[in-house]
C-alpha cells in the first residue's frame, strides 16, 4: 500500500498523541481501515481523524457532561443507509418493531461488545443495533459523539419478544457485562460517551431498573468488601424528546461490527464476575400478575455457563445465538 506525505504526518501525530494522552476514544482510528475504499481515507475522514488527535492533546473535559446549550447543533438528516438495513447475524431489519415486541435501550461501554452479548441470547431477540443515546445533538456522527460535545453515550437498542425473553434477563446481562461503578468511562475508554445508562419506556421498566440497581449495588459491596456506588444513569426515554429523541442509529459499519470479517476484537467493558441477586429477592412488584409477567425466562443453567466473565470474553465467543439446548 502506497503511503503519502499526509499519511506520514498523520502517523507522526498519532504517535505523539499516544505518548501524551490516554485514549479517550480509542476506536476513532479504526474506521479508515475498515470503512474506507482501497484508495485510502477521504479528506473528510482524515480531517476528522486529525481533529480526534488534536482533541487527545487538549480538548474538552470529557469527564463532565456538555450542557444542552453548548452541544453541537447536529442536523435534520437521519443516518445514511440505515433504512432497510438488516441485522448481520439475525437477518431482521434494524428499524422495525413487530407487533407484541418491545424495545430496551442501554449503554455499558463500547457498544461493539455490548451489542454482541445481547444478540447471542438464545431466544426472543428480534434485533440489536448500536447507536448514540441520551444526548442533545440530533443525528450525531461517530466523530461528534466521540468528541464529548453531543452528550450522547454509546448505546444498544434491543427489539425483543417479551413472551420469549424477559426484560429482566436483558437487564441482568446489562449489569453483569460491565462495571456500573466506573463513572464516565469503562476500562480504557474514558469520557461521557462511555457512561453507563439504562433508559426506560414505561413505569414497569423504570421500577425493574431501579430495584435491580439497588440490589446489584448491595451485592457488589458484599462481594468485594468495599463501598461500590453504581453510577449508572437511569432516565425516561421521553426526557430526550425535546432534543429530537433518545436514540440515533450509528453508522452501518458499526452495526454488528464484531461479527464482520476483519473486525478488531476490541472490548473495554469490565465485567465484575458478580451475579445479580435472584429476581424474587428484589422484584419491585407486590402484584402477583406483574411479578410473573417479568419473571426471567432464561434458566439458572444458562447463567452458570454463559454469564459474562471478567475480562470481557464476549469478543471471542461465536457470533451465532446460543442454542437453547446447549
Image: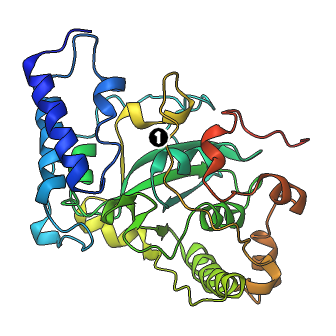
- Is residue 16 positioned above or below 73 on the image? above
Q: Residue at x 31, y 32 (%)?
A: 31
Could you say which is closer to the camera, residue 151 or residue 275?
A: 275
Image quadrant in which you'd find residue 63: bottom left
Quadrant of the image for the C terminus?
top right
- Is residue 13 positioned above or below 308 on the image? above
Q: Residue at x 74, y 55 (%)?
A: 165
Disc 1 on helix, strand or loop? loop
What percent of the width, then of the height, locates residue 77? Answer: 20, 40
| Residue named by callout 1 | 95
What percent of the width, then of the height, locates residue 290? Answer: 75, 78
- Is residue 304 positioned above or below 34 on the image? below
Image quadrant in which you'd find residue 216: bottom right
Would residue 232 be found to the left or right of residue 60 on screen?
right
Q: From this viewpoint, is residue 98 visible?
A: no
**Figure disc tally:** 1
Q: Residue at x 18, y 60 (%)?
A: 149
Q: Residue at x 71, y 71 (%)?
A: 274
Image quadrant in which you'd find residue 128: top right
What percent of the width, then of the height, locates residue 311? Answer: 61, 55
Could you say which is closer to the camera, residue 49 or residue 94?
A: 49
What percent of the width, then of the height, locates residue 294? Answer: 74, 70
Q: From this viewpoint, is residue 143 visible?
A: yes
Could you say which is closer to the camera, residue 115 or residue 20?
A: 20
Amino acid at each position: 500500500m502506497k503511503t503519502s506525505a499526509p499519511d506520514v504526518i498523520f502517523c507522526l501525530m498519532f504517535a505523539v498523541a499516544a505518548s501524551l494522552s490516554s485514549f479517550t476514544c480509542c476506536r476513532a482510528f479504526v474506521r479508515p481501515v475498515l470503512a474506507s475504499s482501497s484508495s485510502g481515507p477521504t479528506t473528510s475522514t482524515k480531517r476528522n481523524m486529525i481533529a480526534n488527535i488534536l482533541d487527545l492533546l487538549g480538548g474538552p473535559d470529557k469527564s463532565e457532561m456538555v450542557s444542552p446549550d453548548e452541544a453541537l447543533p447536529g442536523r435534520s438528516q437521519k443516518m445514511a443507509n440505515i433504512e432497510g438495513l438488516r441485522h448481520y447475524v439475525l437477518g431482521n431489519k434494524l428499524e422495525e418493531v413487530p407487533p407484541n415486541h418491545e424495545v430496551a435501550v442501554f449503554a455499558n461501554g463500547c457498544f461493539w461488545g455490548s451489542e454482541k452479548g445481547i444478540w447471542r441470547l438464545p431466544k426472543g431477540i428480534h434485533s440489536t443495533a448500536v447507536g448514540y443515546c441520551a444526548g442533545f445533538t440530533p443525528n450525531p456522527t461517530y466523530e461528534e459523539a466521540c468528541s464529548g460535545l453531543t452528550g450522547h453515550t454509546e448505546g444498544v437498542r434491543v427489539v425483543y419478544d417479551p413472551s420469549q425473553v424477559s426484560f429482566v434477563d436483558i437487564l441482568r446481562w446489562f449489569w453483569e457485562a460491565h462495571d456500573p461503578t466506573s463513572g464516565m468511562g469503562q476500562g480504557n475508554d474514558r469520557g461521557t460517551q462511555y457512561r453507563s445508562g439504562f433508559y426506560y419506556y414505561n413505569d414497569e421498566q423504570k421500577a425493574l431498573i431501579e430495584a435491580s440497581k439497588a440490589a446489584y449495588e448491595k451485592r457488589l459491596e458484599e462481594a468485594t468488601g468495599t463501598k461500590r456506588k453504581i453510577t449508572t444513569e437511569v432516565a425516561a426515554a421521553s426526557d430526550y424528546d425535546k432534543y429530537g429523541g433518545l436514540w440515533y442509529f450509528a453508522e452501518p459499519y458499526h452495526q454488528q461490527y464484531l461479527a464482520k470479517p476483519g473486525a478488531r476484537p476490541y472490548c473495554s467493558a469490565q465485567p465484575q464476575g458478580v451475579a445479580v441477586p435472584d429476581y424474587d429477592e428484589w422484584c419491585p412488584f407486590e402484584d402477583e400478575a406483574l411479578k410473573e409477567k417479568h419473571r426471567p425466562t432464561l434458566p439458572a443453567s444458562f447463567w452458570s455457563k454463559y454469564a459474562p466473565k471478567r475480562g470481557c470474553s464476549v469478543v471471542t465467543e461465536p457470533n451465532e445465538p446460543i442454542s437453547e439446548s446447549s
